[in-house]
């Protein structure tokens, strides 16, 4: 009797763990989830790990709602967790753990026809807050500056404010676009346009990234470039499945993972 | 149904509804099939009404909760002293406008000296960009290969260096590995070379083809005429720069050098001007640093206020977390942490005291600042050579007047200011309705002012109406009164088909086709007299208005046509019988009779467009600012944001129940009322019309 019971538990445990290890659910930021994490997942599977992934990229905020409801293993976020979010985890008696996923550089882009090569961080601040309104003030050809930014729900909107604008508010003349692609599109069409996009989007035709404080926008300059941020994975302490933990360790430390991260235009964390 | 049945027809007339037409035998609880059908439909109708009421209640509740929250937010804005700091900020902003104009004027004068070279450089960049765009397919492939080649070469060098460091005996395994790698890289380099050898001449050929036809070269400065040698130099320079070159072609280097030299000569002449502009910049330093100091103090107070606001929630969260904890020690620790959360109101008098202490200092500095600016502004040159500098200096003088009055009013406001002065509810309502700023997700303070969004929505709708009504009404008159039947049968469905186009498709059309076309049209030189031309943006009020006009047309057309249809035939027949021509009859009898119906149609069209979201979100340009009406009609070339657009853009990620969330509901409520009002007035007008 005892034996059968033990056997049954063992079978149940094995079945349970097999199911749990089968699938890793990752949700959150679209900066991470659009290209980087899906490609990491592919590379991870190609490296001989038998797991399946479910990845949904609907914005950084969803990372925390998913973790909170217990419907996901890993949350992706392009910003740091907010205090109010930490609170809701505390209320459930959970501690949150932060993993650095990659570093992202935000490029300040202008139209290709602009003769401008370099801007200081102070000038970037002036342009995006509306203090500087004409290109001649920063050494370009005269013309009113048209500023394109992300909209308020974007993580990049907020992190750019922190990194490049001394936390000041955007000027009221800025135009709020839905995504990186749309900003690049408008700047490419407007000789007086300026905007910011993630490193991966600066290759588009018709635009060019200016140097900021004399530092060129190149992955090897990540340490000196002034407008760079870290991207995160968040997990709940003690609730992380072994498979998910193994994947995270691989994704944040392995060389092959680093190559994938750099291929999609971010900088590997290690 | 069965009245033809002779046996039934002899029955005495029944008292039940339906009489003898009623079938017998289908009764459940005394109800037959027809009753069920009736109840089904009336049930559906009442369900719709119940849902409508629920929606209204939900909207109204969220919106009603907005004002108390908004009031609380504004109270905190005052208590923490942020309001005071923003009075100082107003001075700084007014100064920035003055400084910016004089700075632009200076650079306009300076750049005038090297205009020839700068125009040539700009033209060169235009040609380069043209060539790059036209050859992008080949160029992308070549650039990829070149990047790969460079990477492989770098890797090869690294591997060779590593190999040199290794000891061939002890690390034989690693050495083998590295040798394998070196072989791999060498092979890669070899395999890339043939492709590059093919692609490079191909790119050159394509680029040359474009360069040979110098007539297709487009310059933003269309007056520029190039000499033959310049064209030749441009060709060489562009060919040198495609795909990717280190540095610039000597011709371009030379142009840049000449430009810089001319500028430095001009700068010597403009040294006084420069000194004035620099003096202006420096005059603001003290007030600016005081402003940022005060900002820090107020931010601290604001954080305390926020902490207090969220303290009960945090405490509850910590206690709830402690309850779940099983380990008694950890539990005690968590409870302790929960108890430590401050729930007492912070002492704002103490927190804002440093701000009050700064007031005398500010007054002293502001007066000094004002004087210095006045002196410096009078030193700005009266006579300048360029048009742009003249205009900007005029603007600077105006800005100086504004700056003076701003300083005066700021000083008064600061004198009157008390952190504990009550904030009236009326004040918070008018701050929403007449507020000129909509700033969210700010690290300083969120402002919810409807005015910029309302003006955007309103202007776009008005443009749409102005364009759509004449077209739609004349189309309706033509189709209803003048067109032959065959044409009627074609035109009517065609116009009504517009309604079937999804608005997101129209939005994309607006960005890529209409926007680009409008801007290109606006850059045609002989159209410069049109207000707002040349336009620098693609996404503008005008663009959105035109698209919405297109969308409103079927609504207005159909309703206007109905109104014309409703004019009794006798009217036009009488008119024709009295000898009036067809056109006279249409314009002087039928149209005036149907006028109220047509006005109602226009109103309903307005209701249709003010609620439209997708098109304005994609096409209006999303700039949250009241358009600058000083440009007259040219104002339509500016971007704007709308009430519908802001809801769609921001509702996605705001926290449920937060002030921002409720503000968006309140905007929805305003939209709801506008629609209600428009529909109501349309109904009223229609009722009048039906009385004839």
Image: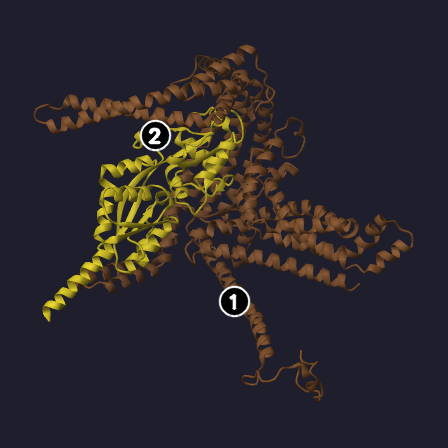
Chain colours: A yellow, B brown
Which class describes the residues within 10 Å of circle 1: few (<14), some (14-19), or many (20+)? few
Q: Is residue B294 visible in the rendered structure shown here?
A: no
Q: Is residue A191 above or below residue B24?
A: above
Front residue of this view, candidates B122 and A119:
B122
Task: Measuring from the top left, give residue B454's x and y in whole percent.
Answer: 58, 49
**Furthest-right residue in this view:** B578
Tell me where residue A79 sits by quadrant. top left
Q: Is residue A229 left or right of residue B90?
A: left
Q: Is residue B11 left or right of residue B228?
A: right
Which class describes the residues within 10 Å of circle 2: few (<14), some (14-19), or many (20+)? some
Instruction: Residue under label 1, please give it.
Output: B54
Cα–Cα gap, marks 1 and 2: 55 Å
Task: Measuring from the top left, give residue B134's x and y in whole percent.
Answer: 50, 26
Task: Measuring from the top left, give residue B370's x and y in whole percent.
Answer: 51, 34
Q: Is residue A58 above or below residue B341?
A: above
Q: Which mark is residue A218?
A: 2
If the image is split into quadrants, where does the N terminus of chain B sit?
bottom right
**Furthest-bottom residue in this view:** B12
Chain on which label 2 sits? A
Chain on which label 1 sits? B
Front residue of this view, candidates B413 and B688:
B688
Q: Identify the residue shown where x is 61% and y is 47%.
A: B548
């Amino acid at each position: 009797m005892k034996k059968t019971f033990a056997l049954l538990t063992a079978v149940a445990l094995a079945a349970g763990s097999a199911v749990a290890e089968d699938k890793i659910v990752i949700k959150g930021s679209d900066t991470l989830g659009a290209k980087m994490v899906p490609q990491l997942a592919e590379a991870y599977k190609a490296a001989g790990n038998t797991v399946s992934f479910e990845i949904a990229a609907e914005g950084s905020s969803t990372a925390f709602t998913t973790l909170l409801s217990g419907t996901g293993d890993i949350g992706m976020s392009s910003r740091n967790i907010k205090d109010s979010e930490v609170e809701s985890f505390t209320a459930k008696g959970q501690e949150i753990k932060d993993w650095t996923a990659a570093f992202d550089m935000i490029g300040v882009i202008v139209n290709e026809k602009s003769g401008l090569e370099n801007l200081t961080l102070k000038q970037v601040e002036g342009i995006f807050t509306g203090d500087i309104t004409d290109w001649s003030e920063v050494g370009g050809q005269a013309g009113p500056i048209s500023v394109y930014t992300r909209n308020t729900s974007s993580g990049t909107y907020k992190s750019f404010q922190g990194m490049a604008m001394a936390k000041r508010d955007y000027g009221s003349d800025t135009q709020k676009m839905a995504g990186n692609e749309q900003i690049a599109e408008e700047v490419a069409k407007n000789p007086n346009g300026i905007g910011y996009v993630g490193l991966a989007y600066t290759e588009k035709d018709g635009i060019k990234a200016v140097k900021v404080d004399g530092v060129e926008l190149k992955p090897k300059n990540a340490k000196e470039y002034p407008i760079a941020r870290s991207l995160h994975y968040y997990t709940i302490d003690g609730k992380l499945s072994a498979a998910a933990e193994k994947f995270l360790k691989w994704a944040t430390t392995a060389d092959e993972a680093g190559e994938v991260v750099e291929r999609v235009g971010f900088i590997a964390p290690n | 149904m069965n009245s033809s049945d002779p046996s039934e027809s002899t029955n005495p007339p029944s008292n039940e509804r339906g009489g003898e037409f009623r079938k017998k035998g289908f009764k459940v609880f005394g109800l037959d099939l027809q009753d069920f059908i009736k109840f089904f439909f009336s049930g559906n109708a009442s369900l719709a009404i119940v849902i409508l009421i629920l929606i209204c209640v939900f909207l109204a509740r969220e919106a009603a909760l907005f004002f108390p929250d908004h009031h609380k937010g504004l109270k905190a804005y005052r208590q923490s002293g942020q309001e005071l700091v923003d009075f100082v900020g107003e001075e700084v902003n007014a100064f920035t406008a003055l400084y910016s104009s004089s700075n632009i004027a200076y650079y306009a004068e300076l750049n005038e000296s090297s205009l020839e070279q700068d125009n040539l450089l700009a033209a060169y960049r235009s040609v380069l960009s043209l060539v790059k765009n036209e050859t992008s397919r080949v160029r992308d492939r070549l650039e990829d290969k070149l990047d790969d080649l460079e990477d492989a070469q770098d890797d090869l060098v690294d591997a060779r260096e590593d190999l040199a460091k290794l000891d061939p005996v002890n690390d034989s395994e690693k050495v083998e590995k590295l040798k394998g790698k070196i072989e791999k890289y060498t092979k890669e380099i070899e395999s890339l070379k043939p492709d590059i050898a093919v692609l490079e001449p191909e790119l050159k050929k394509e680029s040359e083809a474009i360069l040979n036809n110098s007539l297709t070269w487009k310059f933003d400065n269309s007056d520029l005429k190039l000499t033959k040698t310049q064209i030749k130099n441009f060709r060489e320079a562009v060919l040198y720069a495609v795909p990717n070159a280190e540095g610039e072609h000597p011709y371009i280097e030379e142009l840049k050098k000449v430009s810089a030299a001319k500028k430095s000569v001009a700068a010597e002449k403009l040294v006084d001007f420069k000194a004035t502009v620099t003096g202006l910049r420096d005059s603001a330093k003290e007030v600016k640093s005081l402003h940022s100091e005060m900002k820090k103090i107020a931010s601290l107070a604001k954080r305390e206020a926020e902490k207090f606001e969220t303290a009960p929630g945090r405490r509850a969260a910590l206690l709830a977390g402690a309850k779940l904890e099983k380990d008694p020690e950890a539990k005690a620790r968590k409870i302790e942490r929960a108890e430590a959360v401050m729930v007492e109101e912070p002492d704002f008098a103490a927190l804002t005291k440093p701000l009050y202490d700064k007031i005398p200092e500010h007054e002293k500095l502001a007066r000094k600042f004002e004087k210095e600016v006045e002196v410096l502004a009078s030193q700005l040159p009266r006579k300048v050579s360029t048009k742009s500098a003249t205009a900007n200096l005029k603007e600077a003088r105006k800005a100086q007047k504004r700056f003076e009055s701003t300083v005066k009013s700021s000083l008064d406001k600061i004198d009157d200011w008390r952190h504990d002065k009550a904030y009236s509810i009326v004040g918070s309502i008018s701050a929403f309705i007449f507020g000129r700023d909509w700033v969210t997700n700010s690290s300083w303070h969120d402002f919810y002012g409807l005015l910029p969004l309302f003006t955007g929505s309103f202007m776009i709708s008005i443009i749409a109406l102005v364009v759509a009504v004449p077209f739609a009404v004349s189309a309706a008159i033509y189709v209803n009164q003048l067109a032959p039947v065959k044409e009627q049968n074609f035109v009517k469905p065609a116009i009504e088909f517009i309604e079937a186009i999804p608005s997101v498709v129209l939005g994309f059309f607006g960005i890529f086709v209409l926007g680009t076309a409008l801007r290109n049209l606006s850059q045609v030189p002989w159209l410069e007299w049109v207000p707002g031309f040349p336009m620098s943006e693609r996404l503008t009020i005008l663009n959105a208005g035109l698209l919405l006009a297109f969308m409103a047309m079927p609504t207005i057309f159909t309703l206007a046509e109905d109104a014309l249809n409703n004019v009794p035939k006798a009217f036009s027949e009488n008119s024709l019988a009295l000898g009036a021509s067809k056109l006279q009859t249409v314009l002087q009898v039928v149209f005036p009779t149907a006028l109220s119906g047509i006005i109602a149609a226009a109103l309903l069209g307005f209701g249709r467009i003010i609620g439209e979201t997708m098109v304005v979100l994609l096409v209006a340009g999303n700039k949250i600012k009241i358009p600058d009406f000083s440009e007259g009609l040219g104002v339509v070339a500016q971007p704007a944001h709308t009430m519908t657009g802001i809801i769609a853009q921001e509702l996605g990620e705001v926290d449920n129940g937060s002030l921002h969330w409720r503000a968006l509901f309140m905007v929805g409520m305003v939209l709801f009322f506008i629609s209600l009002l428009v529909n109501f007035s349309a109904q009223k007008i229609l009722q009048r019309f039906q009385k004839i």
